[in-house]
Image (cartoon, grey):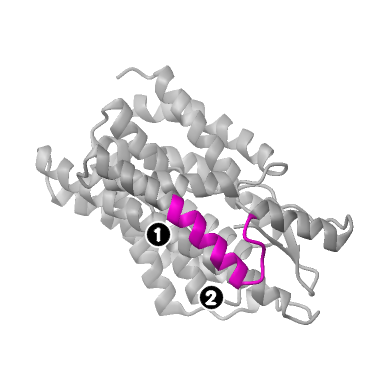
Amino acid sequence: MGWWDPAIAVAGLVVGVVVGLTGMGGGALMTPILVFFFGVPPLAAVSSDVVASFFMKPIGGIVHLRRGTVHLGLVTWLCLGSIPGAFTGVLVLRALGGGERMQELLLVALGVILVIAAAAMAIKAYLKLRERERLRGQPDVAEPRLSTVPVRRVATVLVGLGGGLVVGMTSVGAGSLMIVCLLLLYPTIRTSQLVGTDLVQAVPLVAAASLGHILFGDFTMGLTGSILVGAVPGVWLGARVSSRTPGSLVRRALTVVMLASGTKLLGASTGLVAAVTLASVVVGVATWAVVRVRHGEAALVWQQRRRYREREAGATTPAASGTDAETAPLLTGTTGRAVTDS
């Protein structure tokens, strides 16, 4: 494959826009696209996607560092697990050997992780919904400084280790699986702060995974270059659009895509994949509407926006921009802190 492949560059552009718009990791999209639509061997797809991610991850991290939404102590303990975990994940792939058997095992592993990641995105949305409900009931008091929140060291290192292993082996997980674990470990920290923390620690994580794949994986300069030609401007464009366009609908659609891709990678027939996709859309929309109502919000997002406008009579809240996916203000709690759609 030559250095320049226009079709892969276009795919990289689309994935980059989605990453910039929603803050999701690109591995959950780019790797299946390379495998399904371009016939790239799974190991080569994972290796090239991991290295390409190394050039995109710092963008979001810098934004959050400038905003002060990063717990540097938490980053340190996550990296103590994620850096060796990511490198070890590549060594595990190498230990499995080459040939078709290893490629088949990698496809199954990627399918399992994509299904789990889709479930993790749903859990993340629910935890954010609970956070909004909690903030609405709090009095108007100052939040503690992020740096003073104590770190649960052993649990945090284990989260980093597990996340690093998964990213090193499949290129998926840093922006979906790990953030859910952090939300469960640190329920008092706001979601935007945990997202910023996760993005910053993902830079050394992906750097370790990239080094491992360059040394021991199936890294291809031409494939990686083609991805980056489209992905880098795509991330910039998506981040620009995110300040004016809510990414929640796109994020939910991608959750369904991840579920469908994972199911297909696990060997399901096309008919079963279609049935799973349809069921996830119909049941998911209905279930989410009921859950929203039980947590004090309107069943549909547009109804919530209208309710917000009516209650606040034109009051505005700062819209988040950059790589964190929360871009559309929906509610403002009694503390005056903006909370957004998930």
Q: Which of 121 and 295 is in front in this view?
A: 295
x%, y% of residue 135? 70, 74
> Which residue lies under the disc numbered 2?
186
Region of the chain picked out in magenta, as a range? 282-300
Residue 263, above or below 75: above
Q: Quick one: label 1, few (<14), some, or many (20+) residues within 10 Å?
A: some
Label disc, if present, on residue 119 of the rendered structure: 1
Confirm whether the magenta stretch covers residue 286: yes
x%, y% of residue 123? 47, 64
Mark 2 falls on what kind of element?
loop
Q: In this view, does 297 lie to the left or right of 165?
A: right
Q: Residue at (47%, 60%) from the top-left corner?
A: 122
Q: Quick one: label 2, few (<14), some, or many (20+) residues within 10 Å?
A: some
x%, y% of residue 132? 66, 69
| The C terminus: image quadrant | bottom right
Amino acid found under the numbered disc labelled 1: Ala
Asked if one can make out residue 49 in the rendered structure from this viewpoint, the answer is yes
Q: Is residue 249 left or right of residue 243?
A: left
Asked if one can make out residue 70 in the rendered structure from this viewpoint, the answer is no
Q: Residue at (35%, 65%) from the top-left corner?
A: 161
Amino acid found under the numbered disc labelled 2: Tyr
Q: Residue at (84%, 63%) from the top-left corner?
A: 311
Residue 73, above or below 96: below
